[in-house]
Image: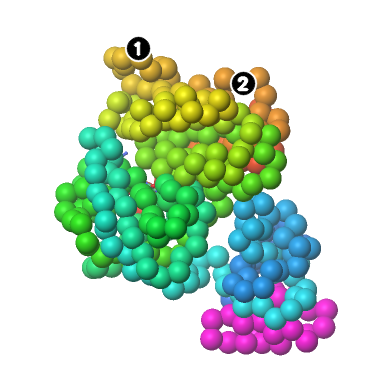
Amino acid sequence: MQRITIGESTFSCQPNETVLETLLRENIKVPHGCRQGLCQACQMRSLDNSPPTSSQVGLKDTLQKQHYFLACLCHPEQDMTVALPNQQGASIEARVVSKQLLSPDIVQLILEYQSPFSFFAGQFVNLKRPDGLTRSYSIANIPLAKNILEFHIRRLPNGQFSSWVYDEVALDAQLSISEAQGACHYLPGRAEQPLMLVGTGSGLAPLYGIIADALAQDHSGPIHLFHGSRDINGLYFIDEMRKLAAEFDNFHYTPCLSGEDIDSEYLRGRADDLALSSTETLSGWRVFLCGHPEMINQAKKTAFMKGASINDIYTDAFHVFQVEK
Ligand SMILES: Cc1cc2nc3c(=O)[nH]c(=O)nc-3n(C[C@H](O)[C@H](O)[C@H](O)COP(=O)(O)OP(=O)(O)OC[C@H]3O[C@@H](n4cnc5c(N)ncnc54)[C@H](O)[C@@H]3O)c2cc1C
């Protein structure tokens, strides 16, 4: 009989019982619906052992890699420590080691941490400042020996966290960081697959990490980045991206501006429209969409209509709301 640990409690899974049935029998509240692996409402994560592959059917490859599984399909083959997706692991402390403007509106913040921390470039963390105000930000760098995390934070007018970062945060300031979350990241394999990446404003942050990761892992298929903003203040890393495109034949970079009176150096229009109309079909492509939630909603539908498999569309929507205060 396998044992299931959740939080401080451990339960025995009866023969033929699923993890969902065990937890519900023990009055643990687990969201669930169809109990057939279709609605995916009972998604959980194993914190130690790999879940059986039969319990990961239909989940995105990036979620499978992070040991997510469907509790209603999971007949455990070994003891498991599990958590609901919104149950956070322990936070770690980090300190600011660099802060610089990337554009008049966007700050690059680099934090250094000491405790063990694992992540994929493109995932996000919740940053908490000393008074408890917490916001999500996407990781722009790949894991390095140096124990650093890079963030690109756009200042919103009167935005509590982003204005604080922009105006007040100084070197050596301490922040706490949640564990890395989210399924929008690169996985090796299918190295010849064409990649389409579309981001608006600081939506370049996760894409920058994903591109660095793909190139570091020898992705050989074409990689197309369309980075858009209404005005020039929302575009940044233009020289870095052009340099990367000169260095790697398979990387193509298109900065786009959608506002009025735009300099002709840049393609005119919305990044998602320009990106998704630049190819006849997206069948067989991997698509990454990051930034403004409305752009992502619309572009996701269009990418699907143009042939991209829903399992090959990865999104990181920058919803603006308070995580906790
Ligand atoms: C998964 C995820 C990843 C994210 N990653 C990033 C990232 O990498 N970089 C990044 O910059 N942000 C990112 N965000 C957004 C970030 O979490 C914050 O929501 C954002 O920085 C605003 O927080 P704030 O405290 O400054 O604003 P708040 O104090 O929360 O105030 C937001 C206020 O600004 C208003 N507002 C919203 N949009 C605009 C706008 N365009 N112009 C003017 N006002 C506006 C809202 O109505 C609201 O009143 C991410 C969000 C999520 C959910």
Q: Which residue was labeled with disc 1? A: 264
Which is nearer the eye, 218 or 185? 218
Q: Is residue 212 left or right of residue 220?
A: left
Residue drawn at point x = 40 percent, y = 58 percent: 146
Task: Give the left or right position of residue 113, taking residue 282 as reference.
Answer: left
Q: Is residue 8 magenta?
A: yes
The disc at residue 30 is: none
Residue 110 appears in the figure? yes
* The magenta segment: 1-28
Q: Circles 1 and 2: CB distance less than 8 Å?
A: no
| Residue position for label 2 | 279
For mark 2, give the secondary structure: loop
Q: Give the x, y percent position of residue 13.
A: 74, 83
Q: Residue 121 in the image: state x and y as whole percent.
A: 49, 50
Q: Is residue 246 above or below residue 7?
A: above
Q: Quadrant of residue 33?
A: bottom right
Please indicate whether residue 18 sits to the left or right of residue 152 in the image: right
Give the x, y percent position of residue 267. Answer: 42, 17
Q: Position of residue 216 (x, y in %)?
A: 54, 43
For badge 1, the amino acid type reads Ser
Choose top left, top right, bottom left or bottom right for residue 74. bottom right
Picture residue at 55% right of the left edge, 25% below the top: 249
Residue 293 visible in the snapshot: no
Q: Say which element carries label 1.
A: loop
- The amino acid type found where label 2 is placed reads Thr
Q: Residue furthest top?
A: 264
Distance from mark 2 CB to nearest ligand 1 atom below 8 Å = no
Tell me the CA gap for discs 1 and 2: 22 Å
Front in this rendered view, residue 99 or 320 = 99
**Mark 2 closeness class: few <14, some 14–19, many ≥20 residues within 10 Å:** few
